[in-house]
Image (cartoon, rainbow, N blue to C red):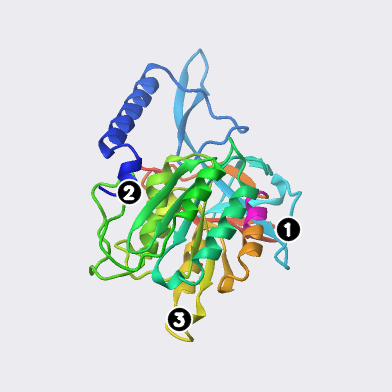
Amino acid sequence: MTDYQKRRPSARAAFVFLFALVFLTISSVTAQSPPPVTSSTPQSQGQEKDKPVDIGQDTVIRTQVSLVNLYFNVKDKRGGLVPGLTKDDFEIYEDGVKQDIKFFSAETDLPLTLGLLMDTSGSMSGVLPLEKEVAGIFLRDFLRENKDLAFVINFDVNVELQADKTSSVRELRKALEKLRINEGGGGARSIPGVQGPLPTSLSGARGTALFDGVYLAGREILAREVGRKAMILFTDGVDNGSKTRLSEAVTAAQKSDSICYVLLITDSFYYGRSGYSGDRDMKKLSEETGGHVFDAGTRGRDLKSALDQISSELRSQYTLAYTSTNPRKDGSYRRLEVKTKAGKVQARRGYYAPVE
């Protein structure tokens, strides 16, 4: 039994709860028609609501409407955030087709679910103490009690959930303090909802399961949340032990509608001047999900300034929602592009359509 399994309810209990929730949801939809979608209340990506269409003589036909939500920032040429923009400053395109913006907001006070993913592999030996300290300070200053939620996952040869979703900074900081470097041994991924353990690595050798960590955080935790969601990765970006591929990790983050920020920290003593290649993969992960890679330098000297910038971006997001002109519920990937003359848009590059 893993440490996580000792702390959390059994997979069977989680499955029974999920089944009951689905059953009650189906029963509720069957019993009564849900309220219509309005432009002032955006729904999560792919979430469907019945929209009544009156054709006269008390006859109403209900059509299925799916709203696509997008959170994004706008930056000027110097990388500074551009505030004060309105709906008229933007155009949104899906697969090259212009869409009609149904909802727009410049809210900066929306709740957030945040995942801290901490690299505890051997290559982080020289920087992990600093990472834990700075991450704890960030949570203390950023997280709003009873409004925001955060969780802590660490990855090395294993992926472990150290702290489940909570608004308690005290509990989260306790989880950070428990983190230790792990360079070897066996083990399995331990996240709720996974059907059977993921192997330690493809070959059974020592490794760093970075992609597995992102995949599980997106698929098994953040996908079940609503509203704004983000991951912050403290890592050197090198994966050499995951079962999942980079593309699968990116897809899991996209499907959970999560922004990925990467604090890239390299230990010059560990890598020397050659053999490092993590920045390329992390750039793809962040750009595809609307995030950014921050180079914290060797030994993490720029960690705090990077976290300050992430905090500013997460508190200064614009939100828009639209009803896609493509009605097909085929699960296909659709490219998104937000255009504005006010600056450069930082947003995820696409989303996956709902499945019938």
Q: Quadrant of residue 102?
A: top right
Please give left or right for residue 264 compared with residue 205 in the image: right
Residue contact at pointers 3 and 1, CB within 8 angstroms: no
Going 46% across and 45% down the picture, which residue do you hit? Answer: 326
Could you tell me what secondary structure mostly forms the magenta stretch?
Answer: helix
Which quadrant, please, contains the C terminus?
A: top left
Residue 120, how many percent across, how many down? Answer: 42, 64
Return the residue at label 3: 271
Q: Amino acid at mark 1?
A: Ala
Q: Tell which of 44 and 273 is nearer to you.
A: 273
Q: Amino acid at mark 3?
A: Tyr
Magenta stretch: give its range: 310-315
Q: Nearer the viewer, residue 312 or 146?
A: 146
Instruction: State yes or no: residue 312 in magenta.
Output: yes
Earlier residue among tags 3 and 1:
3
- Left/right placement of residue 145 relative to residue 178 reads right
> Mark 2 to mark 3: distance in Å?
31 Å
The residue beneath circle 1 is 342
Q: Is residue 193 visible?
A: no
Compared to residue 132, the image places residue 88 above or below, namely: above
349 or 189: which is nearer to us? 189
Q: Which mark is residue 3?
A: 2
Residue 172 can be seen, yes or no? yes
Q: Is residue 274 above or below residue 186?
A: below
Which element carries disc 2, helix, strand or loop? helix
**Residue visible at 47% across and 19% down in the picture:** 60
Q: Compute the Cα span from label 2 to label 1.
A: 49 Å
